[in-house]
Amino acid sequence: MTWECAEDEYNPSFYAKPDEYARFRFVENPHCFDVQSSKNFCAQLSKGGKAIVNVDFEVWNHGYRMLAVDGRPIQDVGGWGHNGANDYSGDCPPIH
């Protein structure tokens, strides 16, 4: 997945800091995205210097959750997350 810092996802109703949000896009379909928060997320991803990262998911019948990015577990920091699509009406996410 590609990633970008997502400070615009900050919500003061939650504990996560603005720099702890990241937006991930599926390489196969960049219209589809997933926003997650994790401790020092943006700084860690930036330090890694990679445009594309490996993401581990737990997948079930009609849903999923992100577990780790490049082998680093998602750390709950009291943030919020969501997924969706920009200008796309097909199935998201393309997880198999």
Image (cartoon, rainbow, N blue to C red):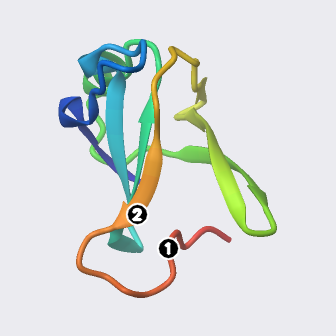
**Picture quadrant where residue 39 is located:** top left
The percent coordinates of residue 75 (x first, y second) are 57, 18
Q: How many marks are shown on the rendered structure?
A: 2
Q: Is residue 69 above or below residue 82?
A: above
Query: Element under label 1?
Result: loop
Looking at the rendered image, the quarter that the N terminus falls into is: bottom left
The percent coordinates of residue 42 (x first, y second) are 29, 24
Give the mark, 1 or 2, whose residue is nearer the N terminus.
2
Is 37 in front, or is 45? 37
Is 44 in front, or is 17? 17
Residue 32 in view (yes/no)? no
Which residue carries the number 2 mark?
A: 84
The percent coordinates of residue 36 (x first, y second) are 45, 36
Q: Given the current orientation, which residue lies at the most extreme left position?
A: 8
Q: Who's the residue at 30% across and 38% down the image?
A: 50
Q: Is residue 7 above or below residue 58?
A: above
Q: Given the current orientation, which residue lies at the most extreme front position?
A: 13
Amino acid under disc 2: Gly
Residue 89 in view (yes/no)? yes
Q: Is residue 17 above or below residue 51?
A: above
* Mark 1 vs 2: CB contact within 8 A: yes
Which residue carries the number 1 mark?
A: 92
Is 93 placed left or right of 59 in the picture?
left
